[in-house]
Amino acid sequence: MLLRSAFKKYVPGLLLVSFLGLTGCENDAQWLLPEPPETEQPSPAAPDYWPTTAWQTADEAAHGFPAGAFDTLAADAAVALPYHTSLLVIKDGWLLHESYNSTPNVTSDADRKNHVWSVTKSVTSMTLGRAWTLGDLRVPDGLAASNVLDLTTGDIFPPAIMSTLPADDMRKTITLRNVLQMRSGLAWNEPAWLMSFSAMKDPLLRAYYGMAPACPAPPDSHFLACSILQQPLAYNPGTVWNYSTYDSYLISTFFTGITGHSLNQYAADNLFSHLGIAADTDWPNLPDPITYGGGLLNIRSRDLAKLGMLMLYDGRWDTEQLISKEWLTQTTSAQGPGLIATFDAMGEPAAAAPLDLYYGMQWWTKTGVMTGDDALTARGHAGQFMQIFKDKGLIILITSDADSYPETLPVRSSQINSFLKTSILDKL
């Protein structure tokens, strides 16, 4: 667990808004993917072109915005959000606005690859959806599960990991479904973990903080997954939602165990390549075969926007259904009323609290977290947002530099959402 002194630095209200916006959910361990709604939102009409090779620009007035609506958008964003590095607005598949803002630490332009932090989680979910659509994410022969999402760590993780746990340990029953939903039950206090390493710039160093001695030291295989499972259980798997980047890492461990492929290479070969996403997009493995499914994706803004466009058009790209609508409908549906993990004054797990959860499987379903406009949203630490408004045919993407203007970190989420709403969304 975390050093208790680290938790004293954590200001709950501020960090909830700035990083996670923690909300809650409760369903029992058998909670399944939600049924599609009785009246599904229709897919937007197919765009006039697909930006596989390049984005095409258009005037905002031709796509529902007032003439000149974005004339001062770049300048206004530079003042209101000085830490942001890129801002893109896409409507009906057309690039209506694109601007890049240099910060005291970063010179930004269209060629810069942005570290998008937890936006990576949504790309992880998309990659699993691609593998599921192709038939590569399935129950391996000889296992009893009827649904791939019900495979457990005991089914899939290597013996070198599972042998570190007692034979009847419930951590062996954590399912792929649980970690996609962030319901592993592991006692992990992510806000305090992040704040305890606020001075460290390297996310890999964050990833290796506080790991257990029962596991082999890196670079031995599966060190981090083994170490994550050394964390005690605070709640029964599947019962309580707790935002955890390490749950996202376990997703990647499941993926490799089931498919035999690393998540990053599979995404590059089977997803990114279809969209024309640059081959030098950077999404590393750690010093073992597992891709860091919860972060570390470095991608150009235009390429990230292509992933947003794939989601806007329900997994379709040109003439191909790259990700099935069934997978997307199920994994992007909010979990709804339930229980959220809480922590006491010393940072230890406490009784779970009831609250609605606007979170599906590695996707948020609002522009904010507990409030905001309905939108499919990928979001990451320090001001990374990709908001997808299916009913409007609209994508808004903004990236930010984590190191510039650090005093703004606690309020960036609210600042960004307010600016995007008043400067873009309300003008449509």
Image: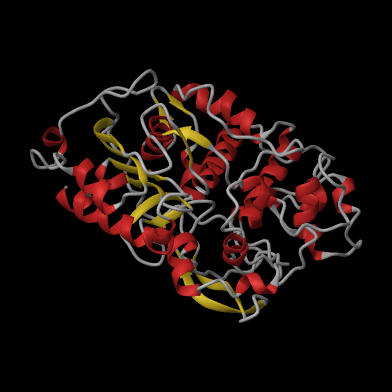
Label count reads 0
- Percent from the top left, x then y, of residue 148? 68, 45
Instruction: Please name whichever residue, 286 or 148, is drawn nearer the observer in this view of the structure.
Output: 286
The quadrant of the image that shows the N terminus is: bottom right
Which one is nearer the viewer's eye here, 378 or 217? Answer: 217
Looking at the image, residue 175 lies above or below residue 53: below
Residue 269: horizontal and vertical position, in percent?
Answer: 59, 23
User: Which residue occupies 59% across, 75% down?
Assistant: 8
User: Can residue 70 be seen in this snapshot?
Assistant: yes
Nearer to the camera, 25 or 342: 342
Residue at point 80%, 43% (across, down)? 222
Q: Residue furthest front?
A: 104
Tell me if I can see residue 147 in this picture: no
In the rendered image, residue 394, in percent from the top left (x then y), is placed at 28, 42
- Rendering colour mode: secondary structure
View extreme (left): residue? 67
Q: Which of the pair 260/292 is nearer the observer?
A: 292
Give the x, y percent position of residue 184: 68, 61
Q: Is residue 280 shown above or below 62?
A: above
Please give left or right for residue 28 compared with residue 14 in the image.
right
Q: Quadrant of residue 66?
A: top left
Residue lying at 81% horizontally and 44% vertically, measured from the top left: 143
**224 horizontally vs 324: left or right:** right
